[in-house]
Image (cartoon, coloured by chain):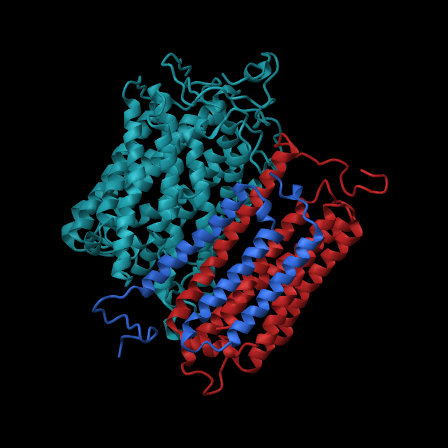
Chain colours: A blue, B cyan, C red
């Protein structure tokens, strides 16, 4: 199925751009917003907003919303495969080694050597 | 029967049939060809050169290993020899081998198309491969590289005094070539199948190449960026893996093996595709469990991305993650085992004909099984601790890669040789060379299992005296193996000029590629064929025309 | 077509030799470009993976490093790219309707915005890093007291320069391809029967925008 057969009206693109601009302001705002006890949420919030922005760009500007399932599948697979890399690699650094001198979660970057 | 027009099968006797080899003899028509068949043949020639080069390196260090002392080469030189053997064999022979040669040649024919989806990108992919090859050769003349084909940091980034940058660049561009080939294959299989050729009528060769394309496309970019990071750290000191600024060499290993493990499935899956075709043809039987094999190919491709940590059990990786990787590695063995059982079941009830390709296929089934089972030993974390970086590992991957992949490559080359070149190879010499290769291979690598079990480390140029006997046996086997391959290459080249002319379907095989003239015409099909048959619809009454 | 509507580019879609129909060709090409983008995701993914590991290991140093980056310039750059994505989408829109003049204008605007992004990066942001001696390898000499751990802070800047350079390289390549497409537009080769080159360039451009969408919070807003 050709993506071009779905000719979107121009205003869809303009609205999309405005939404993205708004999300960008939200990102910056969330950075400056005082979170207090919830400081650890700063990164997840930023990532959620970034993922939303990426989703809007991909679905609307790149026309994936109106594309064939094949396109959707392979576009999604790229991100999924990236997640495999990140998840397992991070797992190596996150999983505690019980009794191991090599992991100190309180100061992860600290070398175990004297 | 697929519908083909008259003038395809039997051209008029008076005029010499035009095919893809003789339609234009000029050198430019080869350099700028967008004919997938010509590109496949060019790849074949280039890959064979690298195969021989890799073999030379192997011979050199096997000679060194005949004696316990490091007396022929210094340790540094020895390091360069095994590194170059690995780099050349993996990036310039094993990974491209079947996909770039047989895959390129056969994919459009099997799918019923006039060419791949992107012929010019196919050509680009070949010339990028050649460029990568030139970079690899320039590594040779600048003193080689000694880091091992695995380029572990910080040796590769900081401490090595060899041409690491050129070597990683060569691998980088070879990878780029591979990505383009993978994309081409995926699009062709998805979008260019002939009418009536549904997914479950595809030859299993194509399922295998589809799965291979997925891995090539998704895995190779990661090793590309990893090698890029090695390169810039080496040349400009931008230390992303540098421990002095907090860098982590184990991160390199994660990123490197994320591709390099699926890469071994890039190597073996096309081989398995070949075996499916050869076993079906020479058992005169449809492949047992077609769907199981098709889905197993996809299963290997997907699960293969979840197991890379089994190369890193003793690297300092989290033990708990190691358990996960160990379990997943056991899991990835299952689809391969399913295939082995199914091919064996294909023999049953069939009419087995022992041609050269079939000899190689049978050898594959036995040798790959041994290779795969020894992989289970290594997947067991506890076993891997004493076996890691010993000759047990070396034997394991040579059983799968040489006993498996290269044997399948030989099977495929012999099976489709008449179609690709229009000539038959000499059957007696071919069988002789297959037997020589089989015995040579086993004498080379079986002793290495024992050596690894006894504790001999890999990548060492000297060893304790008590292991000499096994090492000598291994070198003797390697010599035999080398002769076997040289004999094979020799008679194949000979057959190009003096071999008996082949008919369109000398094996009595089923498949779209066998229904066209030999060698195929430049544009494959005059009319798009319509497929109405299931694959491998052998009745047992097919006649060989050798 | 109404009389006032001029078809720009080929009168009818051109089918390449290996394809049977134009639909098959368009589907194959679209699938192909998406596979290319999927592998680009994996290419950048390796870098984001390295970032994730080091941010986890050195959270404090990453925060300190991030303070050295200018959020206003980062936000401006992000807006520039988002706007360029809009102009790119509009360019595709007009190509699909054979409006050559608007096609050229929007493509030109996209490329100009891309160049503006690069200009801001190379004339404001990076020289600032040099001025503060925060460039690994070339000029690493941060003022004492800037960071609690100079060595680990350097890792932040190593990643910053590698990842933004890789992104910038993709932008430069994009601008190069865009200039070629601009020539094709000017010579009236692209229109409603041949707009896939522009559409695919648009995909590439949007993809590069998506990468920046993640780079911005990960480096500037730690």
Question: Picture coordinates of residue B143 (x, y %)?
Answer: 42, 58
B275 vs A29, nearest the viewer: A29
Quarter of the C terminus of chain B within the rendering: top left
Vertical comparison of A53 with C25: above or below: below
Question: Picture coordinates of residue B158 (x, y %)?
Answer: 39, 68
- Regarding residue B146, the answer to whether it shows in the image is no
Question: Picture coordinates of residue B278 (x, y %)?
Answer: 37, 26
- Seen as rendered, the residue at the extreme right is C3
B270 vs B341, nearest the viewer: B341
Question: Picture coordinates of residue B283 (x, y %)?
Answer: 33, 20
- Seen as rendered, the residue at the extreme bottom is C144
B381 vs C133, nearest the viewer: B381
Residue B156 placement: quadrant: bottom left
Vertical comparison of B272 with C79: above or below: above
At a point 56% along the width and 78% down the height, the residue shown is: C129
- Seen as rendered, the residue at the extreme left is B466
- Is B455 left, or right, of C201 in this rendering? left
- Is B256 left, or right, of B452 in this rendering? right
Vertical comparison of B73 with B29: above or below: below
Please count the marks in the image. Answer: 0
At a point 54% along the width and 76% down the height, the residue shown is: C69
At a point 65% along the width and 43% down the height, the residue shown is: A6
- Is B503 left, or right, of A103 in this rendering? right
At a point 36% along the width and 34% down the height, the residue shown is: B272
Residue B29 placement: quadrant: top right
- Regarding residue B304, the answer to whether it shows in the image is yes
């Amino acid at each position: 199925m050709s993506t071009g057969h779905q000719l979107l009206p121009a205003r869809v693109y303009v609205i999309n751009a405005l939404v993205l601009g708004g999300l960008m302001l939200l990102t910056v705002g969330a950075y400056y917003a005082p979170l207090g006890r919830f400081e650890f949420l700063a990164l997840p919030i930023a990532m959620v907003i970034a993922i939303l922005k990426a989703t809007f760009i991909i679905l609307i500007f790149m026309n994936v919303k109106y594309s064939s399932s094949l396109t959707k599948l392979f576009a999604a697979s790229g991100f999924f495969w990236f997640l495999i890399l990140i998840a397992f690699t991070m797992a190596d650094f996150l999983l505690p080694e019980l009794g191991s001198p090599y992991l100190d979660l309180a100061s992860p970057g600290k070398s175990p050597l004297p | 029967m697929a519908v083909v027009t008259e003038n395809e099968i039997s051209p008029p006797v008076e005029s010499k049939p035009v095919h893809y080899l003789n339609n234009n003899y000029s050198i430019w028509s080869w350099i700028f060809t967008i004919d997938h068949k010509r590109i496949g043949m060019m790849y074949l020639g280039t890959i064979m050169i690298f195969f021989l080069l890799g073999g030379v390196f192997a011979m050199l260090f096997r000679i060194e290993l005949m004696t316990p002392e490091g007396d022929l080469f210094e340790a540094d030189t020895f390091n360069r020899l095994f590194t170059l053997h690995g780099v050349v064999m993996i990036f310039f022979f094993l990974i491209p081998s079947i996909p770039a040669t047989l895959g390129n040649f056969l994919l459009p024919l099997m799918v019923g198309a006039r060419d791949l989806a992107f012929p010019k990108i196919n050509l680009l992919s070949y010339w990028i491969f050649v460029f990568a090859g030139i970079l690899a050769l320039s590594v040779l003349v600048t003193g080689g590289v000694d880091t091992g084909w695995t380029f572990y940091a910080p040796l590769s980034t900081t401490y090595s005094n060899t041409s690491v940058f050129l070597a990683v660049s060569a691998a980088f561009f070879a990878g780029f070539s591979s990505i383009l080939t993978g994309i081409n294959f995926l699009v062709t299989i998805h979008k260019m199948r002939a009418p009536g050729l549904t997914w479950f009528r595809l030859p299993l060769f194509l399922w295998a190449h589809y799965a291979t394309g997925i891995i090539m496309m998704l895995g190779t970019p990661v090793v590309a960026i990893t090698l890029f990071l090695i390169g810039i750290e080496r040349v400009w000191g931008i230390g992303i893996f540098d421990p002095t600024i907090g860098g982590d060499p184990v991160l390199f290993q994660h990123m490197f093996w994320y591709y390099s493990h699926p890469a071994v499935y890039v190597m073996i899956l096309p081989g398995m595709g070949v075996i499916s075709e050869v076993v079906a043809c020479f058992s005169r039987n449809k492949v047992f469990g077609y769907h199981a094999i098709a889905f197993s190919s996809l299963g290997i491709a997907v699960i293969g991305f979840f197991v890379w940590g089994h190369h890193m059990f003793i690297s300092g990786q989290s033990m708990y993650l190691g358990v996960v990787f160990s379990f997943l590695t056991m899991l990835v063995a299952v689809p391969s085992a399913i295939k082995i059982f199914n091919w064996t079941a294909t023999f049953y009830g069939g009419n087995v004909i022992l041609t050269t390709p079939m000899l190689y296929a049978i050898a594959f089934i036995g040798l790959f099984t041994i290779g795969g089972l020894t992989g289970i030993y290594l997947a067991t974390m506890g076993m891997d601790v004493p076996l890691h970086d010993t000759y047990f590992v070396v034997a394991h991957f040579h059983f799968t890669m040489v006993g498996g992949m290269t044997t399948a490559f030989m099977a495929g080359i012999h099976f489709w040789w008449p179609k690709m070149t229009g000539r038959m190879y000499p059957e007696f010499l071919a069988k002789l060379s297959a037997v020589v290769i089989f015995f040579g291979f086993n004498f080379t690598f079986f002793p290495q299992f024992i050596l690894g079990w006894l504790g001999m480390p890999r990548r060492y140029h000297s060893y304790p005296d008590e292991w000499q006997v096994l090492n000598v046996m291994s070198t003797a086997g390697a010599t035999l193996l080398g002769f076997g391959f040289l004999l094979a290459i020799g008679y194949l080249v000979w057959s190009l000029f003096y071999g008996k002319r082949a008919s369109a379907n000398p094996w009595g095989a089923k498949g779209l590629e066998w229904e066209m003239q030999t060698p195929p015409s430049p544009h494959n099909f005059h009319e798009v064929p319509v497929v109405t048959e299931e694959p491998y619809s052998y009745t047992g009454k097919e006649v060989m025309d050798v | 077509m109404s009389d006032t509507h001029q078809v720009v580019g080929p009168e009818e879609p051109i089918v390449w030799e290996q394809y049977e129909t134009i639909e098959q060709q368009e589907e194959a090409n679209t699938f192909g470009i998406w596979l290319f983008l999927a592998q680009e995701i994996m290419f950048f993914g390796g870098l984001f993976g390295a970032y994730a590991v080091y941010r986890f290991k050195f959270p404090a140093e990453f925060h300190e490093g991030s303070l050295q980056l200018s959020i206003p310039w980062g936000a401006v750059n992000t807006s520039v790219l988002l706007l360029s994505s809009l102009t790119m989408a509009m360019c595709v829109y007009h190509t699909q309707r054979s409006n050559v003049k608007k096609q050229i204008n929007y493509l030109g605007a996209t490329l100009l915005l891309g160049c503006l992004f690069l200009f801001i990066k190379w004339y404001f942001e990076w020289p600032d890093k040099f001025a503060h001696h925060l460039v690994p390898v070339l000029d690493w000499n941060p003022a004492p007291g800037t960071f609690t751990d100079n060595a680990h802070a350097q890792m932040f800047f190593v990643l910053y320069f590698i990842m933004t350079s890789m992104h910038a390289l993709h932008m430069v390549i994009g601008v190069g391809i865009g200039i070629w497409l601009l020539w094709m537009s000017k010579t009236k080769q692209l229109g409603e029967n041949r707009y896939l080159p522009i559409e695919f360039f648009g995909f590439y451009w949007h993809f590069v925008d998506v990468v920046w969408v993640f780079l911005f919070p990960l480096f500037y807003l730690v």
